[in-house]
Image: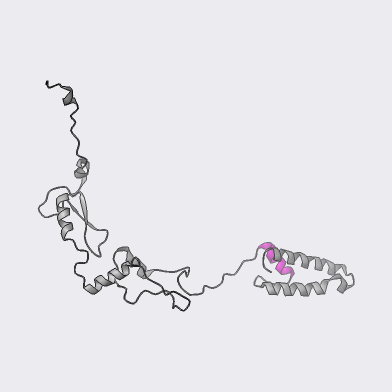
Amino acid sequence: MSSYSKYFEKIRVRPDPQAEVKAHAPACQWDGCKEAGTHRAPVGRMKEGEYFRFCFEHVKEYNKSFNYFSGLTDTDVARFQKEALTGHRPTWVMGAGGSGPRTAADFAQMRSGRAGYYNRIRDPFNMFGDRQAPPRERKAKPLEAKALETLGLDAKATGADIKSRYKELVKRHHPDANGGDRGSEDRFRDVLQAYRVLKQAGLC
């Protein structure tokens, strides 16, 4: 078999897929190791988002002895497990007889990671509470405002006020009640038109 055999042409050297990663990775943080720190390892509890950088061999060694609950008492571990049932979020009392949003009495004050945000959660739209937001005043549109002015009412008038005022003005300005007075007929026509506008707007 010659050195230029077709079998030698099929031999390929497979490139190392980690070569590029290793070239840009920081050094391993294990004491005395000079390999590339290509693997991340979590620092520990209350430091979520922070990582050590180790090489492959040392990250395996680190993970064997890593304990997230190191230094916690059994009570704290049990409390963490209870909070995990609700995703470390506060709970609310169900039903109409509840006293509004509140966290459980034995919720931990120190929360892990982003879960601490939920201790300070705000409820600007009162989705979880029983606080009654003040009703917003409806601003009358130009045609509605003019119609209310025709009836002698302001923007705060209710549907009952509008109907009551309309009946009063119809009785006063109806042609049968005024002996054919033309001025009263024009006023009567304006009252009818104003009431029609307000009714179409849903105000009465």
Quadrant holding the N terminus: top left
For residue 152: magenta?
no
Closest to the observer, 162 or 140: 162
Q: What residue do we see at 77% from left, 73% from top?
A: 167
Q: Which residues are magenta?
A: 140-151
Q: What residue do we see at 21% from left, 70% from top?
A: 72
Count of residue discs = 0
Across and down, in percent, residue 85 comes to 33, 67
Whether residue 27 is visible to the viewer of this picture, yes or no, is no
**Overall secondary structure of the magenta stretch?**
helix
For residue 141: magenta?
yes
Whether residue 176 is situated above or below residue 33 in the rendered picture: below
Across and down, in percent, residue 105 comes to 34, 77
Q: What residue do we see at 29% from left, 63% from top?
A: 113
The residue lying furthest to the right in this view is 179
Whether residue 195 is situated above or below residue 49 in the rendered picture: below
